[in-house]
Image: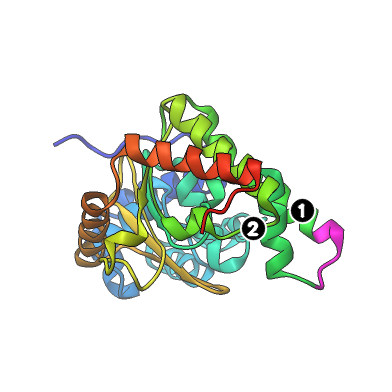
Amino acid sequence: MAGPKDLDPSSSPRAFLGSELRHAREAAGLSQEELGGPLFVSGSFIGQLEAGTRRMMHEYAVQFDRILDTKDFFERNCAALAKSKYPDHFAEAAEAEAIATAIRQYAQLLIPGLLQTKAYAEAVFRAYKPLAQDAEIDEDVTNRLDRARLLDNPTTPLLWSVLDEAVLRRVVGSPAVMAEALRHVAALIRRHRIIVQVLPFGAGAHAAMDGPLKIMEFEDAPPLSFVEAPDMGKLLDDPATVSRHTLLFNLLQATALSPQDSLALIESVAHDYEHGEEHA
């Protein structure tokens, strides 16, 4: 079995800290499971820290310094990871998303952040924060559009989205904003950059009615799933849970329209918005 892949310490603070954690653990003669035991975390969690797919929290850094006799190295350096331009509940998921090889997501009400246009994102953030100053909204929009730059890579990550039909029908901003947003999604599909399926209202009850879902896969670490609610989010690594969420996504794929029919519907609804036609 191949050994763990060396990380590029210059690529990110997480990659640097993960690489150092692996070297310190191996120098101490500990397996990932043995290091995780005193912290009540799994060996796979330690592996995710070492691979850079999980952020090292302060409480873990302190324990690593104690167990691995690294003085205060991890505690000091983990401070660089605490700084994020994203909300606390989403920061770790955004960092994982940026290095994922595949992202599969179900969107219940909104076009996913990676696929949003500037005008659509502005309307979303203004609805979330009706009393916020324009500068704060502008910063939020900039950060969201920066996330979407990972799609500038022509092949990685694989992005497969299942959109509830409500995503298409709910007017966010204005009909003109919706038309632009849906045309943007359609353009990404036509460039063969993303795969999108629409889950029609006619499908009735389905496997993910409780809320949105995101599953991320990585080259050198187990997959993660991310679930969220207003101002809350949780990144999950329990294999049984991730497996269950993967099954949910597979069921949604089987129930949704084909990618070809989905594109046709997206472009039809965009046309309706552009011409002021009824689409309810």
Left or right relative to 62: residue 250 = left
Viewer-side residue, 186 vs 92: 186
Residue 85's spot in the image, x, y percent? 67, 55
Query: Residue drawn 50% across and 53% down?
Result: 168
Q: Residue furthest front?
A: 277
- The relative height of residue 135 versus residue 184 in the rendered view (above or below) is below
The residue carrying mark 2 is: 172
Q: Earlier in the sequence, mark 2 or mark 1?
A: 1
Q: Is residue 239 visible?
A: yes
Q: Residue furthest left?
A: 1
Residue 156's spot in the image, x, y percent? 41, 31
Span colored in magenta: 131-136
Viewer-side residue, 277 vs 104: 277
Query: Residue drawn 77% across and 71% down?
Result: 130
The residue carrying mark 1 is: 139
Q: Residues within 10 Å of mark 1 (few under 14, many from 20)?
A: few
Left or right relative to 89: residue 119 = right
Left or right relative to 219: residue 185 = right
Residue 147 sits in quarter: top right
**Residue type pointed to by label 1:** Glu
| Colour basis | rainbow
Residue 126 sits in quarter: bottom right
